[in-house]
Image (cartoon, coloured by chain):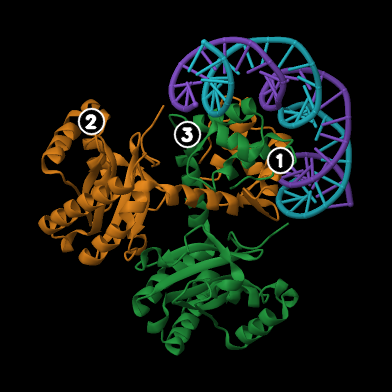
Chain colours: A green, B orange, C cyan, D purple
Amino acid sequence: MAVTTPEQLPTPVSMIDRVVRILDAFEGADGLTLAQVVRQTGLPRSTAHRILEHLAEVRYLRREEHTYRLGMRIMELGSLVIHQDRVREAATPYLHRLHQSTGLVAHLAVLDANEVVYLDKVGNRFGTLLPSRVGGRLPAARTGVGKALLAHAPSAAHQPERLRAELARIRERGVAYDREEAVRGVGCVAAPVIGAGDTSALAAISVCGPLHQLRFARLASAVRQTVADVWRAASRNAATPRGVAASRR
Amino acid sequence: MAVTTPEQLPTPVSMIDRVVRILDAFEGADGLTLAQVVRQTGLPRSTAHRILEHLAEVRYLRREEHTYRLGMRIMELGSLVIHQDRVREAATPYLHRLHQSTGLVAHLAVLDANEVVYLDKVGNRFGTLLPSRVGGRLPAARTGVGKALLAHAPSAAHQPERLRAELARIRERGVAYDREEAVRGVGCVAAPVIGAGDTSALAAISVCGPLHQLRFARLASAVRQTVADVWRAASRNAATPRGVAASRR
DNA sequence: AGGCCGCTCCCGCTGACCGGGACGCTCTCA
DNA sequence: TGAGAGCGTCCCGGTCAGCGGGAGCGGCCT
């Protein structure tokens, strides 16, 4: 499998496009040989080889024998993005409080098109039960944070009927629920952090855990309290916006 | 300040070098204008402008008005690096256990030249008291994890006398201590995760907290136990090595 | 031994990239 | 009010960094 239609990718013209295409190839597997990169990117062998070597030289990739992996410099830059995000900065202490007061896993996420991207995750106690991961993506419509974000996004009006109804309910209550929509036996309670002037959400916060031990009413008020605290903390320092969210082209 | 000697940087010749230099400029500040990038990188205005725009197009940067910031794609790639690291994967559950049993902050870090880079940090309870950060760097000689790593690194023989003596003691005991060397009032207990065949350390684990509430003897055995568990878990799945550590050119 | 596959290196050609400079905008200061 | 400084944007002719076909090599299968 993974037989991406051979060569039907438009040939990238700029150097940057070539580099991006190569780096993107590493999202699928955690270690690629030259030949694998060539197959995935459709670039000529010598071109791919040259760029891979060059990227390894600047430590954006790491080479071990004949396999390349993403390197340390990319990790450092990536974690810097998260670190510099103002909403995340304001939210982290409150996520810890939320985690401690509920004993569940607390999330912070932003919307990107139809997916959520997680910026923080506190209290990994359920191991791999939860599919969420800092820097990871999940379809928005099937997660608590995602629905909370969609409910307060410009795109809310253009969703399919069934979802639109649920989003309206979420806007009313200020809280979104997920009852094993993403993972069997797991539920979430989520609420959006709304921007200052407008009505679109900057980010969303959730707590997730085994469905049978969730007290929804209690969690709803805890999450609502948390987003209020985060909003206050964020707007205290906030002169200019500074988040990875929003601003698509 | 920050008046990097103007123009004395060697002019980068390749596109990749130029891109790297621009991205590196964002490590200092979380948001740069074109003019600031030009000053920091020494690149011609039009060149910097063209590259910045191009990077924003592929979402490696994000543009808001006239300031550029690191973008979402970089965050995603970066967190992927951490996620794909085998040692980190094996260590995380044990870091949680260590955190819960001690009530302190648990770290996982690797060595890079004379610095440590943190791969995981569990239990942020002391807020900004600890300078460690996932993806962040600190001088190795002044941290617990750093000394544990240096003690089992090839470079151990070439350190200054005083440090060399301490590293020898660490090799004997299998545990490194930090008593407010990095931060006033804070101490750490650390131990290295040693590679399979050889004697050099893959990574190191530590617990850190307020000095007055540290029971060193008890923590030492807890950390030793943890590295043993992690080693076992890591070598279970480990066919090929897969970590951001090691392999300098 | 012959075929297959993967990595590396070479080298002549060319178009992607370079960067000086023009232009327009917004401040600030005289 | 107008000159000047600083900034971002855009243009365009020249050129060299990058391109990529292909040769060479070495390992691993029949």
B83 or B29, which lies in front? B83
Give the alpha-carbon distance from disc 3 to disc 1, as whole Å. 34 Å
Is disc 3 placed on a helix, strand or loop?
strand
Label 2, label 1: how far apart the Cα atoms are: 45 Å
Q: Is residue A33 above or below residue A219?
A: above
Q: Residues within 10 Å of mark 1 (few under 14, many from 20)?
A: some
The residue indicated by pointer 1 is B49
Front-most of residues A145 and A244: A145
Q: Residue at x 11, y 39 (%)?
A: B172
Of labels 2 and 1, the one closer to you: 2
Numbered disc 1: secondary structure:
helix
Report the disc number at residue A67: 3
Give the number of marks: 3
| Residue that badge 2 annotates | B156
Position in image of residue B230 (x %, y %): 26, 51
At label 3, the amino acid type is: Thr
Q: Position of residue A81 (x, y in %)?
A: 52, 53
Are the residues under marks 3 and 1 on the same chain? no
Q: Mark 2: which secondary structure?
A: helix
State whether residue B40 appears in this view.
Answer: no
Return the mark for residue B159: none
Q: Is residue A153 left or right of residue B159?
A: right
**Left or right of A185 in this view: B193:** left
Badge 2 amino acid: Ala
Please give the chain letter of the residue carrying mark 1: B
Tell me the residue at 17%/63% (across/down): B213
Which amino acid type is marked by label 1? His
The answer to which quarter of the image holds residue B226 is bottom left
Of labels 2 and 1, earlier in sequence is: 1
Q: Chain of mark 2?
A: B
Question: Which-is-in-front pick, marks 2 and 3?
Answer: 3
Residue drawn at point x = 48 percent, y = 74 percent: A206
